[in-house]
């Protein structure tokens, strides 16, 4: 039952239920003279209007509730009534104000979305959301930011071993707004200062958003990173003892707390991490060890992503060092001991469509006694044309029906031109944490012993992927840096044999056991991605 509403302009002033009922009775009385105050109270109870609803979402319910109480009004009149009750203003004025909103905000304590004009307006709302979460439900002082092209979500844990739970979300007011993240760094810095500098909590995942937004201001220097790249960016921590060395080996990649925790695992036995200093090149010096920071960004494409790697200078790494010390203080020096994979939008969820090998698909369907026309008729898709690119849902429906031995045969393999030559291991390292399988093609005739050597080397890489993802149980999981050289080891092994490797990524389906308890209408597959390697002789 509605007990109060938000005052005009969303100022948060509460209107008592009696006043609300009087407002409704006065408005409806003009359309239905017999409508009484008792009718208004009944209509408010029956419509269950929420304090923070948009009038558009509550108008239909209000119209129906009024009809039950003898007042039949048009939908446009119900919109006006809902706007008066919820916003204290006419529908036209409320709608006109909403035209200037660029962002929307949802919080767990205000279930309805709130329109915001800018990131400046969003900043204090996000601070309040974090403070309320920490006071009411959180069991730890860590909050996490998840960013995708449609929203920034703040998450927290409500129990010691519970999963992360969203408590606030901010996104674009228009779905087609590709630049909605522009200017977000100032709001996030406001949030960081009010939460971290007061030692109230730590916000993990904030750094990549800020770095991508800040780099958008530096495009004159040739950088190609924009705020829209934040959902596909992550930090990389490298052991790089010589600042003139462009190499080094990777310690970990991910968000701040994962990097900080793995740093301590990698410096065990070195000087205390509290004694870290920043050199002129931005490196962290800890005893005899030196660490460099990078920002890695994947630029999504169909088979192989573009990869932009940028070293962080002393200004950015000094900020990270300050936040490392703040995290140690807030968490009582207990940083996470295990690396957590950062979820990127690229490869994070299945694409809408995939390229299909039509010859193999039709052959598999024929072997199952099913024609394309018959399948489309049975699936309610009669007359649908068979094209080289099909929706993933339709593809999974076909595979569920024909049950091929290997469901992955229907996906088209990329051509050489669609792959990237692995002149180093950087692209493979970026993809490795996000694939579940390795698929390869040898594009030349080889003797049996060479094929066996290549097969063994790729088998080692596949085992590394399974170990890293926890698919092979281990009592004490190994730190990330143990796996950092696996891709380069494979590349160098192939180079010794006189081969080069081209890299890409493909969808990968794993059939679930028939005994698995699946929801109705679900497909019997787990979806993932394969690292695709095309191996050929080195022509140089």
Image (spheres, helix red, strand yellow):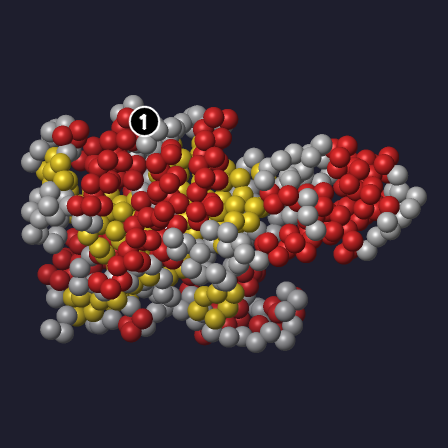
Q: Nearer the viewer, residue 267 or 506?
A: 267
Q: Nearer the viewer, residue 294 or 350?
A: 294
Locate residue 141, reporting x and y percent. 39, 28
Q: Nearer the viewer, residue 131 or 367?
A: 131
Tell me if residue 19 can be seen. Answer: yes
Residue that appears at 12% across and 48% down = 281
Tell me if residue 524 can be seen. Answer: no
Which residue lies most toward the top here? 332
Residue that appears at 19% across and 52% down = 311
Residue that appears at 8% across and 52% down = 245
Locate residue 247, reporting x and y percent. 12, 52
Mark 1 neighbour class, 10 Å CA radius: few under 14, some 14 to 19, many 20 or more: many
Residue that appears at 14% across and 44% down = 283
Looking at the rendering, in which quadrant would you find the N terminus?
Answer: top right
Q: Quadrant of residue 509?
A: bottom left
Vertical placement of 307 versus 42: above or below? below
Q: Quadrant of residue 506?
A: bottom left
Vertical placement of 226 versus 278: above or below? below
Locate residue 400, reporting x and y percent. 54, 58
**SS of the residue under disc 1:** helix
Q: Which residue is mark 1?
A: 330
Q: Quadrant of residue 318?
A: top left
């Amino acid at each position: 039952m509605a007990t109060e509403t938000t005052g005009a302009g969303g100022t948060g002033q509460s209107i008592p239920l009696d006043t609300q009922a009087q407002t409704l009775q006065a408005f409806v009385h003009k359309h239905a003279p017999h409508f009484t105050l008792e009718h208004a109270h009944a209509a408010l109870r029956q419509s269950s209007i929420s304090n923070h609803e948009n009038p558009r979402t509550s108008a239909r319910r209000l119209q129906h509730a009024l009809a039950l109480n003898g007042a039949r009004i048009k939908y446009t009149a119900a919109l006006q009534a809902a706007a008066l009750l919820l916003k204290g203003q006419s529908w036209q004025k409320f709608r006109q104000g909403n035209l200037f909103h660029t962002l929307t905000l949802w919080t767990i304590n205000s279930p309805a979305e709130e329109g915001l004009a800018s990131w400046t307006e969003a900043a204090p709302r996000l601070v309040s959301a974090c403070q309320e979460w920490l006071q009411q439900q959180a069991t730890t002082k860590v909050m996490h930011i998840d960013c995708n092209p449609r929203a920034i979500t703040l998450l927290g844990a409500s129990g010691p071993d519970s999963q992360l739970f969203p408590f606030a979300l901010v996104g674009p007011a228009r779905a087609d707004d590709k630049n909605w993240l522009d200017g977000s760094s100032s709001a996030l810095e406001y949030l960081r200062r009010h939460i971290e500098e007061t030692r109230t909590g730590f916000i993990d995942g904030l750094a990549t958003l800020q770095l991508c937004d800040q780099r958008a201001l530096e495009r004159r220097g040739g950088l190609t990173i924009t705020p829209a790249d934040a959902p596909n960016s992550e930090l990389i921590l490298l052991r790089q003892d010589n600042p003139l060395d462009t190499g080094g080996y990777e310690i970990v990649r991910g968000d701040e707390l994962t990097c900080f925790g793995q740093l301590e695992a990698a410096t065990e036995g070195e000087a205390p991490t509290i004694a870290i200093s920043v050199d002129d090149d931005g490196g962290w010096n800890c005893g005899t060890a030196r660490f460099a920071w990078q920002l890695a960004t994947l630029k999504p494409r169909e088979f192989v992503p573009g990869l932009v790697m940028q070293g962080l200078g002393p200004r950015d790494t000094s900020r990270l060092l300050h936040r490392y010390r703040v995290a140690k203080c807030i968490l009582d020096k207990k940083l996470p001991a295990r690396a957590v994979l950062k979820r990127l939008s690229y490869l994070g969820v299945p694409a809408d469509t995939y390229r299909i090998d039509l010859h193999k698909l039709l052959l598999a369907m024929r072997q199952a006694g099913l024609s394309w026309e018959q399948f489309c008729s049975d699936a309610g898709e009669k007359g649908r044309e068979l094209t080289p690119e099909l929706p993933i849902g339709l593809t999974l429906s076909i595979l569920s029906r024909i049950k091929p031995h290997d469901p992955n045969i229907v996906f088209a393999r990329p051509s050489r031109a669609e792959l990237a030559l692995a002149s180093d291991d950087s692209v493979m390292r970026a993809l490795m944490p996000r694939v579940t399988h390795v698929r390869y093609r040898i594009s030349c005739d080889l003797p049996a012993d060479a094929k066996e050597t290549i097969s063994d080397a790729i088998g080692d890489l596949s085992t590394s992927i399974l170990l890293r993802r926890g698919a092979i149980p281990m009592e004490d999981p190994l730190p990330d840096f143990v796996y950092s050289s696996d891709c380069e080891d494979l590349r160098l092994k192939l180079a010794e044999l006189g081969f080069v490797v081209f890299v890409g990524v493909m969808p990968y389906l794993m059939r679930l056991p028939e005994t698995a308890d699946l929801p109705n209408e679900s497909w019997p597959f787990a979806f993932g991605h394969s690292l695709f390697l095309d191996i050929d002789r080195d022509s140089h």
